[in-house]
Amino acid sequence: MLYIGLMSGTSLDGVDAVLADVDSARSLKVLAHCCLDLPAELRAELLALNTPGDNELHRAALAANALSRLYAEAVARLLAQSGIAASEVRALGAHGQTVRHRPGEFDTCGYTLQLLNPALLAELCGIDVVADFRSRDVAAGGQGAPLVPAFHRAMFARSGKTVAVLNLGGIANLTVLTGDDTTLGFDCGPANVLLDHWCQQHTGRPYDDAGSWAAAGRVLPALLASMLNEPYFALPPPKSTGRDRFNPTWLTTHVGDQAGAQPQDVQATLAELTARTCADAVRRHAGAGRELLVCGGGARNDHLMRRIASLLPGCDVRPTDACALPASQVEAAAFAWLASAHCERRSGNLPSVTGAAGYRVLGALFPAG
């Protein structure tokens, strides 16, 4: 069965799309991949919608329409690239753009909100759309995130061995796949969400290419210690986070105490924060593992990868490319896989990861015309 997966992550750098073949054994093979940049105006609006503002409902609805049109463009490119007709694709899984993530808060249930207009996407593509993956897990008392660990187990598990998978997107999340078929997963803390913000603010570049700017700076011990005191890092799993917590205001609060701090030194310290929190999570929860597979945009940050490897001596730290699934394709492929799970009425969540009351079929279906 052919499925499409569409993902725009917390880093707000673009839309990743994959066309994948998912077989009866639930294994997946990517047939085509493309990535589209977010237009600057849409990126700015989505970023602004992460915090309260005027006329939010109207603005959010229009942003959802614009993102859906960008998703549809990505689908058109995939189909043209592969020579596959829309009628041959069983469904597409579309994540949408997270602008709020507050599970378990306020009324004990809380909520998670991903902007998208899946009905418009179905109209534009002529393909069944599966969307709103996270809310059912939240309704069942879970965190609604991360959802990729079930896919990680299907793709990367090794019999009798513990393998850890680290996604370095806007937020870093870790999956631990043990040799006895148990799975643990949770968000470690910030990754590209703060690194990209600081780089954009001080250099005008959207991201720190290969981490070269951070590598030119020096870690500020007092700033690092201040950030590591964030209570989130000490929480046990299940746990998840996002821009609701790790945002420019959070960063400014900590940097404000560092008189005379140079921008490249703050960048170096932010990279060290990500490396430390991820390495700590691996040591604490995957101590028996000797293999760490890394995906997401951070897998291309050479400085960050070196720092993580140096903090995990004896552990083989490498991108998922070594397992035939490029780091840039993993998250989009996961939502193609989750779409297949929905269509086959299989559960997509793991209660051991999210803390939900049980296994649930995730997502809502918007049929093609």
Image (cartoon, helix red, strand yellow):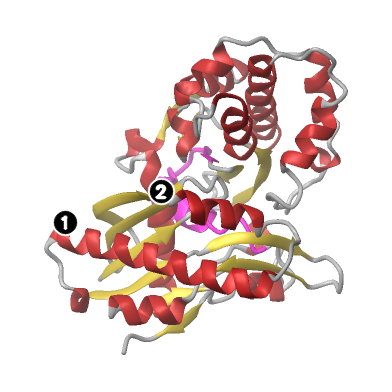
Query: Mark 2 and 1 residues: CB-CB less than 8 Å, in contact?
Result: no
Who is closer to the viewer here, 49 or 275? 49
Which residue ends up furthest to the left in the rendered image?
A: 83
Percent across and percent down for residue 310 are 58, 15
Locate residue 6: give its quadrant.
Answer: bottom left
Indicate whether residue 165 is drawn in magenta. Answer: yes
User: Residue at the location (54% across, 23% down)?
Assistant: 304
| Left or right: 51 as drawn, with respect to 353 | right
Against 180, residue 143 (above or below) is below
Reply above or below: 300 against 362.
Answer: above
Q: Earlier in the sequence, mark 2 or mark 1?
A: 1
| Residue 131 rendering spot, x and y as whole percentages | 48, 73
The numbered mark at residue 81 is: 1
Q: Nearer the viewer, mark 2 or mark 1?
A: 1
Asked if residue 6 is among those painted magenta in the image, a careful observer would answer no
Type of amino acid at the residue the image marks with label 2: Val
The span shown in magenta is 144-168
